[in-house]
Amino acid sequence: MRDNWNCQVTGGSGVLLRPYMRSLVEKYHSWMEDEWLRECTASEQLTMDEELAMQAEWRDDAQKATFIVFDRASADPRTLPGAAAAEKPAAGDVAWSEGMVGDVNLFLLDDDEGATEGSDAFPECRTAEVMVMTAEPGLRRSGVATEAVALMLRFGAERLGVRRFVAKISQSNTASLRLFTERLGFEVYREVEAFEETHLRLQVTDVARPLSRAVEAAAEGGAGPGAGPSGGAAEAPCKPAEAEPSAWEGRVMARTGGWEVAPFENPEPFE
């Protein structure tokens, strides 16, 4: 989506989130040749041409924010924040793919997925589904996925006006279930036995900037680039009724020290 095409997200850890550029498709395609990864992500095997078409589709989709996760320690220094503009590799240079370890995605939802039935504790508000993949075997269970999701959650809350996050995870994927529940404080709200999935949610209760660009635009009476999923103004921020510290404040915010959305001079302009 346009909202993340010219920015990169950094935090206090060694993780960097950067847009999914065409320069990265070859490496991504090599990951998805792995049958185990495809099973874990419910993905189909694609040809290289189909992978390129998928990258363009994700880039243009106003409902989907995709970042590639990088390990800063193994990324090409010329591509990192703070590097001199004159040293940046050209579009298509394989240097951009160095340090790639996985991806993290947000899908903006139009419905009330994750709302609490029969309760006003979670009022209707903007919702997004979050997904993460650590493709490099050597960095699985290293904390990279946790940090990437935490950064993405703050991006969704502060830049896109999301106030409820949901995740849908295979019941057999115990590592991902622990990541979302034990490390980030998601709670189970539904077991879908037909698909062998566990559905989880996390409600936003506080953000560093309470008004996202979408909400600011709504307050001014316009839609703007961060408008709600249907094209109208986004909903105002919403909070559960309880006042005690939440999983959002105690786990997500605590894991994103030094969080920053930095400008990114994308070598592949958004067409």
Image: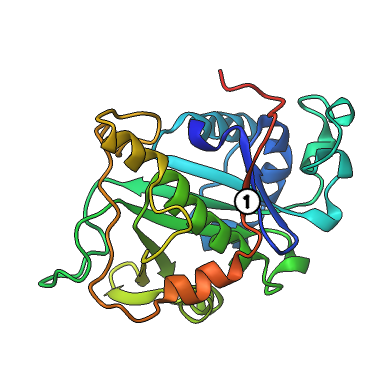
* Residue 218 against residue 41 in the figure, above or below: above
Q: Quadrant of the C terminus?
A: top right
Residue 245 appears in the picture as rendered: yes
The x and y percentages for residue 110 are: 25, 45
- Position of 19 with respect to 230 (left or right) is right
Badge 1: residue crowd in 10 Å (few <14, some 14–19, many ≥20)? some
* Residue 84 against residue 44 in the figure, above or below: above
Considering depth in this image, is 240 or 127 the residue closer to the camera? Answer: 240
The x and y percentages for residue 63 are: 39, 39
* Residue 266 against residue 81 in the figure, above or below: above
- Identified by mark 1, the residue type is Glu
Q: Secondary structure under badge 1?
A: strand
Residue 1 appears in the picture as rendered: no
The x and y percentages for residue 211 are: 38, 48
- Residue extending farthest to the left is 118
- Position of 89 with respect to 50 (left or right) is right
Considering depth in this image, is 22 or 158 the residue closer to the camera? Answer: 158
Residue drawn at (29%, 51%), measured in percent from left and top?
Answer: 126
Residue drawn at (36%, 66%), measured in percent from left and top?
Answer: 205
